[in-house]
Image (spheres, rainbow, N blue to C red):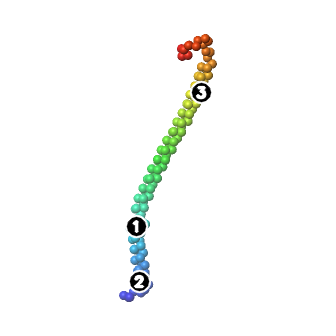
Amino acid sequence: MFGLSLSQVSAGVALVVVVAFVVWLLLTDRLVTRRRLEDVREDRDARVAEAHALASMWREAFEFERTARERFSGHSQAAIEAARTTAAVLQALPSPEGSANADPVA
């Protein structure tokens, strides 16, 4: 056939099939160029860095809130103890005898 052997024709067909397959891979984005791969990696790295920064910010906010809650709890306990002490002192004061109308504030 046109002076070509069967092995030459089949090699040519195989080459055309391989080239067509590579072109199909490129057109359907299953095979990408190095530049495109680097762009995708840079974009991914930027998003990962942003996610880490956001996670760090939330971690700092959590630590700050936890510290504030612990301080508030300590202050609350001190205020409760002061109120108990005040109540005990007021209850220990002698009440005026025979004065039912005495002003407790005065």
Crowdedness near tag 1: few (<14), some (14–19) or many (≥20) residues, C-alpha within 10 Å: few
The quarter of the picture where residue 80 lies is top right
Q: Which residue is mark 1?
A: 28
For badge 3, the amino acid type reads Glu
Q: Secondary structure at mark 2?
A: helix
Work out whether mark 2 precedes mark 3 in sequence or the reverse, and give the earlier one: 2
> In this orientation, which residue lies closer to the viewer: 12 or 96?
96
Q: Are marks 1 and 3 in contact (CB under 8 Å)?
A: no
Q: Which residue is mark 3?
A: 81
The quarter of the picture where residue 103 lies is top right
- Quadrant for the N terminus in the image: bottom left
Work out whether mark 1 precedes mark 3 in sequence or the reverse, and give the earlier one: 1
Q: Position of residue 47 (x, y in %)?
A: 44, 53
Q: Secondary structure at mark 1?
A: loop
For badge 2, the amino acid type reads Val
Label placed on residue 9: 2
Q: Real-space Cα distance between discs 1 and 3?
A: 73 Å
Name the outermost residue toward the left. 2
Q: Are marks 2 and 1 in contact (CB under 8 Å)?
A: no
